[in-house]
Structure formats: C-alpha cells, structure tokens
C-alpha cells in the first residue's frame, strides 16, 4: 500500500532544546494511524509540524515531511495555505480555544469554505448547513447562528469536524479529539470519525493517550516516548507482542 504521508527522521527543537528526535512514521491511503504516548511525549508537536503550526520558538531542525512525495518543509507560505485546511485538515484538542469566540459558527465556516473554493456567500451557507447536518447536529440552523460558548463540548467538537471536512481533505489529523468529553459523547465522536473516514476513503492520524480508543479505531499504531517513536506496527502486533518496555 502506498504511503500518502511520510515523516522521515524529523527533529524538532523548542527554545533550542530538542523535544522530538529522529521521528519517522508513515500514513497510508484510507487507514487510521494511532500515535500514542503520555503527555509530553511529543505527539502533538510532531503532528503540528506536519502543517508547520508550531509556535515561533519551535523549530524543525532536520528531516523531511513528504505528502504525495513532495516535502512540505520546502513549501512557501502560499503553497502551505493550500495544503493546510485543504488537503490536510486538523481537529484540535480544545474546541473552545480553536474556535474564534467573537464569530458565530456560520461566519467562521463560510469564511473557511470560501477560502478553499469558488463558492459565493449563499452557496457557502448552504454548504455549512449540509456539513453540520452530516456530522449529526440536529438543528444546523441554530448551531450556525451560535457562538462557540453557546454550544456544548460535544457540539463544538462536531463543528470542528464539520470545518475540517469542508474541503474534503485527504488527511485528517485528530489531536486528542475526545479528551474533554464524557464517555458517551466520546463514543459518538469516534463513531462519526470512522463513518466519515469510510465514506470519504480519508486517512486519519489519531493522537491519543487512550489505548482503548486505539484498539477500537486504528489499524496501525506508533508509540512515542520522550520525543522518540519507540515502536510502530499493527494494532495486533503492538497490543499482543509489544517489543519495547515502555509499550
């Protein structure tokens, strides 16, 4: 199976100190890859670097990030904008801080859709309603006219997924998408991601510290510890025959 995305020997420093070292993994077409490890293991830093979303004091010191064979690290800002939120989308852990509190959900989504398509405002609004319905929001009109703080955590996470899906991405990076939600809502969000992945033949990188979530949803898994990938393999290999003490 061909690799859609390859992270090759990437090293990242934070304030001049290496926090991720010589990390490599691949994401194949139509699969869900789990990246697991405890807080501080380098999961989020590594995956944010795919879209070069790290803070200014976070620097990629070496390696390649190949998307469809082209190195993202060599792209200029305009080319990056095309990929970011277009072909590769990301769902963040904290939906309240990821959504802008001064804009309604509809305003933000219309702006995002128009940035990546040739739709006019009316067409983009219709697309917003379609997307919100697709992610299981029962009153999409009301959600569209709401501010982020007026929605529950589960609703905000569905909005984030709808925003990520607005450009039909080839790759979706989900950074701890269920962390702040209760168990029932967690299950609903994971089920939704699986449905969308199958329907769109999308590839997903699922970042989590929850091995139960990985067992339910992923095909392969990379285990991170102290800024290194210590082990990578199928879920069966990692769960039944772990090769590293940390795993």
Image (tube, rainbow, N blue to C red):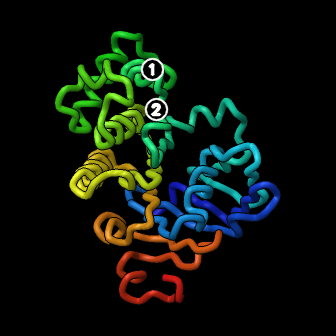
Residue 34 drawn at (x, y percent): 43, 65
* Disc 1 target residue: 103
Identify the residue at horizontal 34%, vertical 10% (top origin): 122
Identify the residue at horizontal 40%, vertical 33% (top origin): 163
* Label 1 SS: loop
Task: State whether residue 186 is above or below residue 53.
Answer: below
Identify the residue at horizontal 28%, vertical 54% (top origin): 182
Question: In the rendered structure, are the residues bearing label 1 and label 2 in contact, judged by CB atoms less than 8 Å apart?
Answer: yes
Task: State whether residue 7 is above or below residue 188.
Answer: below
Image quadrant assignment for residue 125: top left
Residues at marks 1 and 2, CA–CA distance in whole angstroms? 8 Å
* Disc 2 target residue: 99
Q: In the displayed structure, does residue 164 sit left or right of residue 37?
A: left
* Of residues 104 and 233, the one drawn nearer to the viewer in this rendering: 104
Q: Quadrant of the N terminus?
A: bottom left
Within 10 Å of the Cα at label 1, are there few (<14), some (14-19), or many (20+) other Cα atoms? some
* Of residues 145 and 171, the one drawn nearer to the viewer in this rendering: 145
Task: State whether residue 58 is above or below residue 141.
Answer: below
Identify the residue at horizontal 62%, vertical 56% (top origin): 45
Total marks shown come to: 2
In the image, farthest residue toward the left: 138
In the image, farthest residue toward the right: 16
Residue 193 drawn at (x, y percent): 31, 50
Image quadrant assignment for residue 217: bottom left
Confirm whether residue 171 shows in the render.
no
Image quadrant assignment for residue 108: top left
Residue 7 drawn at (x, y percent): 61, 61
């Amino acid at each position: 199976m061909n690799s859609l995305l390859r992270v090759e020997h990437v090293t990242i420093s934070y304030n001049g100190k290496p926090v991720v070292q010589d990390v490599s993994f691949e994401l194949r077409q139509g699969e869900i890859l789990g990246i697991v490890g405890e807080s501080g293991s380098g999961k989020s830093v590594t995956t944010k670097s795919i879209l070069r979303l790290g803070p200014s004091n976070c620097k990629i010191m070496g390696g390649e990030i190949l998307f469809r064979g082209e190195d993202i690290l060599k792209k200029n800002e305009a080319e990056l904008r095309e990929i970011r939120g277009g072909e590769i989308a990301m769902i963040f852990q904290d939906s309240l801080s990821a959504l802008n509190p001064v804009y309604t959900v509809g305003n933000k989504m219309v702006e995002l859709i128009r940035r990546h398509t040739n739709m006019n405002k009316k067409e983009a609004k219709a697309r917003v309603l379609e997307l919100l319905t697709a992610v299981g929001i029962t009153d999409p009109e009301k959600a569209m006219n709401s501010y982020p703080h007026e929605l529950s955590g589960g609703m905000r996470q569905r909005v984030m997924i709808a925003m990520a899906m607005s450009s039909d991405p080839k790759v979706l990076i989900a950074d701890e998408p269920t962390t702040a939600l209760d168990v029932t809502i967690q299950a609903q969000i994971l089920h939704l991601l699986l449905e969308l992945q199958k329907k769109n033949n999308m590839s997903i990188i699922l970042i989590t510290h929850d091995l139960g979530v990985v067992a339910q949803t992923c095909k392969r898994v990379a285990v991170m510890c102290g800024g290194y990938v210590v082990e990578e393999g199928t879920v069966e290999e990692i769960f039944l025959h772990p090769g590293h003490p940390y795993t």
